[in-house]
Amino acid sequence: MTLKIAHLGPKGTYTEAAAIAYADTALIGTPVSLQPYPSIAQTLQAVASREVMLAIVPVENSIEGGVTMTADTIWKLAATLQIQQAIVLPIHHALISIATDMSQIERVYSHPQALSQCQQWLQGSLPHAAQIADSSTTAALTMLSSQPQAAAISSVRAASIYNLPILAHPINDRLDNQTKFWAIGLEPTLAGNCTSVAFGLRSNTPGGLMTALGFFANRGLNLSRIESRPSKRSLGEYLFFIDIETDVDNCPALKSALADLTAYAETVKHFGSYYTTIVDPA
């Protein structure tokens, strides 16, 4: 049976590259069909509705931080979604255009995260070009062949797929730029080197977050990530997403901490325990 994996499209995105890396490392010998979707939310909804078995979504970038659409959607669909694995992918952006000279370029298209990751380079090399946010790093590539005044920030792989020239590479402001992706399905894995949880507090009281985090600190459990997102219910009310560096199945201290958190918080959502794969830059 062919395993369908959803990812942010169109073809050539970094998320598709992460999906290929996941298939090559975790699904060896399994026939895979990659299914592009126009948004991160739709890729996750495709898993929840069982259109596909897995979705690959970006979670966090080393320069720009958390991917808000992923956090908001996984909170909404948490009753059905579980993280299977994390994939860390090196990100090396390229400026793609048919322009013969960069002085011709008036507009640069890309995903907002990619534009932000190249801000210093854009300000120094294309200070007069308008920066236009798009749904993905590859969404604008199909129209570049007829517009020498336009360029896109995407990958070398995408330039090859769409048969377009690269004017500059790499252009990200930090050469150690990385993005973490999650492979998300319906079944928990339990074992791993990381556990992800999200919670909302009962009220906005002094020391409320410190008390919640203290359940982990007091047991010597290290958090590798903490991110806040608006609850969307009222101004100043937040949800908190945390990654704990251990797994639920083999760590009694984590089970105890999560029990205390569940009793203390208004809502706690568990996304599972999983391992992380770092993709070789080569």
Image (spheres, helix red, strand yellow):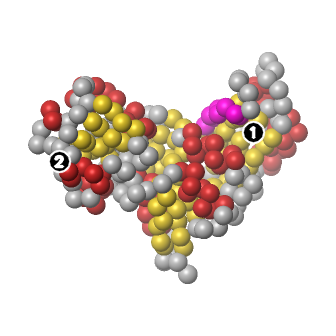
Q: Is residue 182 above or below residue 232?
A: below
Label count reads 2
Residue farthest toward the bottom in the current orientation of the protein: 1
Q: Position of residue 8 (x, y in %)?
A: 47, 55
SS assignment at label 1: strand
The residue indicated by pointer 1 is 199
Q: Which mark is residue 113?
A: none
Figure quadrant of the N terminus: bottom right
Residue at 84% x, 41% y is 262
- The magenta segment is 225-232
- Residue 191 showing in the rendered view: no
Q: Is residue 262 above or below residue 156?
A: above
The reply, left or right, for residue 209 in relation to residue 226 is right
Q: Is residue 49 above or below residue 111?
A: below
Q: Position of residue 272 (x, y in %)?
A: 69, 54
| Residue 229 drawn in magenta | yes
Tag 2: Cα neighbours inside 10 Å, few (<14), some, or many (≥20)?
A: many
The residue indicated by pointer 2 is 98
Q: What's the distance in space between the residues labelled 2 and 1, CA to CA?
A: 48 Å
Q: Position of residue 174 (x, y in %)?
A: 35, 34
Of marks 2 and 1, the one in the foreground: 2
Quarter of image, res 94: top left
